[in-house]
Image (tube, helix red, strand yellow):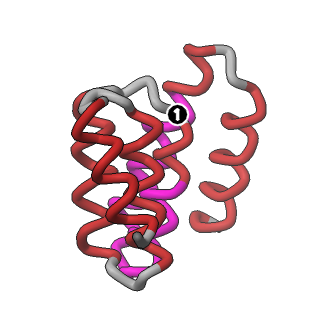
Amino acid sequence: MDRIARIKELLQAQPDDSFLHHALALEHIKSGDDDTARSLFEALLARDPGYVGSYYHLAKLLERQGDEAAAIAVYEQGMTTAKAAGDNHAFSELRSAHEELTM
């Protein structure tokens, strides 16, 4: 069984597990399916905006797709969320990526 199928199987038992949704989106990126990954990340963050790790990956995906304005907005939203959660590591990663894109 491939990883995407396995994660989907796990999601049937744990449909609200943000980690599994995040992992599924990452697997779609690995398989070259950025559109599905984007939809998964957007749905995850709409349902669980505190899942800080997804902001970085979604913003990077948006950069690859050439949507710099959306990527900047996602980085900024992620920085706000990371700061509120006290996640300094995630905040620093998001800020660095944001600065690279906006300079």
Q: Is residue 32 left or right of residue 86?
A: left
Q: Tell me the quadrant of the picture where the N terminus can be found.
A: bottom left
Where residue 60 sits in the image (x, y, percent)? 51, 66
Q: Is residue 99 left or right of residue 67?
A: right
Is the stretch drawn in magenta largely helix, strand or loop? helix
Residue 19 is inside the magenta segment: no
Q: Is residue 99 above or below residue 89?
A: below
Q: Could you say which is closer to the camera, residue 54 or residue 11?
A: 11
Where residue 5 sits in the image (x, y, percent)? 32, 63
The residue at 72%/47% (across/down) is 93
Q: Could you say which is closer to the camera, residue 15 or residue 56?
A: 15
Q: Tell me the quadrant of the picture where the C terminus can be found.
A: bottom right
The residue at 34%/73% (across/down) is 67
Q: Quadrant of residue 45?
A: top left
The residue at 44%/24% (across/down) is 50
> Which range is magenta?
57-80
Disc 1 target residue: 52
How many residues crowd mark 1 within 10 Å: few (<14), some (14–19), many (20+)? many
The residue at 65%/58% (across/down) is 97
Residue 66 is inside the magenta segment: yes
Amino acid at dot 1: Val
Q: Quadrant of residue 32?
A: bottom left
Where residue 42 sits in the image (x, y, percent)? 27, 49
Where residue 95 sits in the image (x, y, percent)? 67, 46
Label 1 residue SS: loop
**What is the number of callouts on the image?**
1
Q: Could you say which is closer to the camera, residue 53 or residue 80?
A: 53
Q: Is residue 33 above or below residue 26?
A: below
